[in-house]
Image (cartoon, helix red, strand yellow):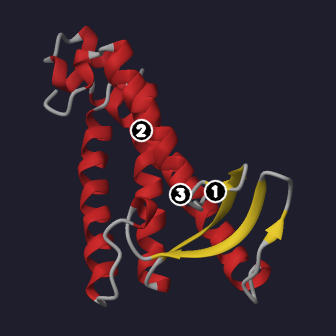
Amino acid sequence: MPISAIAASMQLPIFLRQRSEYRDLIQLGFPIAAAIVVFDQATKFWMVLEIMSPPRIIEVTSFFNLVMVWNRGVSFGLFSSISPWTPVLLGTIAVVISMVLALWMYRARSRWLCVSLALVIAGALGNAIDRVIYGAVADFLDFHAGGYHWPAFNVADIAISMGVVMLLFDGLIEKRRNNRLGG
């Protein structure tokens, strides 16, 4: 008999009854995050060591190129500097934010919220790993139209963007009060 059924039959307090539900969500979120980090790092490794050695522009379609861009800052190159401490500081911030999001994921009460947080965590950690390995984030996906290029990005950036959109949907449209960090 599952723990939640035993807890329900014994009329245990709600925090004890939901412990297995939280565990189920964590068992969903962490493997998703891990898989995305592995995929992100594999694509970056492949691009840096194989495809972009030497660096060049590879035109894939009329609106999409593969390029090699080293982002030493955060989104769109903000806060980039030549200081050797920038990657350390940005990487540390990403890890701390990931830990806070993991706590939130632990307390999540829906699959949607759990997956959205897993995506953001994976993206933050994927880019933090780049900062440790390369001292910058490897971006290589370049979409463009009419001579205007969107800033290059990578799989981790896609995961962060998808996770944030899902969080916005959850918070603004669904208005789920029970998914706030405070419980």
Front-lying residue, 58 or 119: 58
Mark 1 burial class by Cα count in 10 Å: few <14, some 14-19, many 20+: few
Q: CA distance from mark 1 to mark 2?
A: 22 Å
Residue that appears at 51% across and 39% down: 162
* Type of amino acid under label 1: His
Name the residue at 29% across, 46% down: 101
Can residue 62 be seen here? The reply is yes
Give the structural element (helix, strand or loop) at label 2.
helix
Q: Which mark is residue 60?
A: none
Which image quadrant is residue 11 in?
top left
**Quarter of the figure with the C terminus:** top left
Q: Amino acid at mark 3?
A: Ala
Residue 171 drawn at (x, y percent): 32, 22
- Labels 1 and 2: the sequence-earlier one: 1
Kindly indicate whether the residue at mark 2 contacts the one at mark 1 (C-beta within 8 angstroms): no
Residue 79 in percent (x, y) is at 31, 70
Q: Residue at x 48, y 64 (%)?
A: 126
Whether residue 5 is situated above or below residue 37 in the rendered picture: above
What distance separates the C-alpha of mark 3 from that of mark 1?
19 Å
- Determine contact: label 3, label 2, CB under 8 Å: no
Residue 78 x, y percent position in the rendering: 36, 65
**Local crowd size for mark 3, using a 10 Å CA cut-off: few (<14), some (14–19), many (≥20):** many
Disc number at residue 149?
1
SS at badge 1: strand
Q: Residue 156, which numbered label?
A: 3
